[in-house]
Amino acid sequence: MLLSFSILVLKAVVCRALVANSLLSAADDGCNVEFAADPSVDVAGIYAALQAARSSVVATYPTTYLQDHTTSVYSDLLNLTQVSVIHFFSDMDVDCDGLNWDCEGNTDGDPLTSFGALDAEQVPWYVLPASLAVKEAILPNALGAIICNGNLFYAIFGDTNGASPEVIGEGSLLLGQTCFPDDEINGNNGHEALDVAYIVFPQEVPPGVQENSIDIEALKELGDQQILLLQQDLGISLQPNCSDP
């Protein structure tokens, strides 16, 4: 009986690991990414829903300072009832402002981020144009769910872009390297394709945000709560939880 129970437990552990590995792709295969979505989240289904919901444009921004590509921000995600979000698709440049302002490849860093002095190597954050944050009343450190490379990771709204022109599509060094572990991401090398989905929850802020760091566990807890509500709103079923024998 003990042997049979042990086999069941081993099968559950292996199965859950395989599910997690299919959703995450950090350098160590993603199993230890603390700010990744729960395996029950249907990342592909949410990504497809985002692609289909592009009718209510609230703003448009260039993705580079050359202004050769632009992307629009949308707010119409299919008449949501449980959550409020805005979303957009963009690239992912690297923001090394804060404690890591002199990270490799970064030539114009600022020792402060917009709401503190976060550590780009320790905190997953995304960047928004300053005017968008004002227009949409997005709170400092607001929760974000970033779909990149087929995976979903949580981050906070940690910095703004107030340059001229304001550009969109940036993440901290940690977020960029976690999304694209094989692309040699640094302060001067990001991800160029406009295939990263940014989901912003304007009024949801995780507890535990400090001057230089955040509570990653609290970020994940709020992230899973909100993304599963979004998934329900979109009519997307939970993924099978194969940890049940």
Image (cartoon, helix red, strand yellow):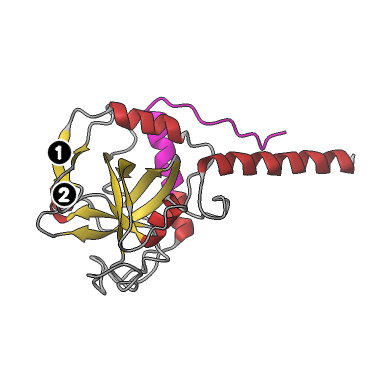
Question: Pointer 2: what residue?
Answer: 132
Q: Is residue 19 magenta?
A: no
Residue 82, quarter of the rendered image = top left
Helix or strand or loop: what does disc 2 sit on?
helix
- Residue type at mark 1: give it: Val
Residue found 44% across the figure and 62% down from its top: 215
Residue 239 left/right relative to 245: left
Q: Nearer the viewer, residue 107 or 90?
A: 107
Query: Which circle marks residue 58 in the picture?
Result: 1
Q: Nearer the viewer, residue 14 or 243?
A: 14
Q: Nearer the viewer, residue 206 or 195?
A: 195
Residue found 34% across the figure and 48% down from its top: 144
Residue 67 spot, x, y in % from top left: 13, 48
On-image quarter of the C terminus: top right
Cα separation between marks 2 and 1: 9 Å
Residue 146 spot, x, y in % from top left: 37, 46
Helix or strand or loop: what does disc 1 sit on?
strand
On-image quarter of the N terminus: top right
Q: Is residue 7 above or below residue 221?
A: above
Q: Is residue 132 above or below residue 8?
A: below
Residue range highlighted in magenta: 222-245
Residue found 49% across the figure and 57% down from its top: 217
Residue 69, quarter of the rendered image = top left
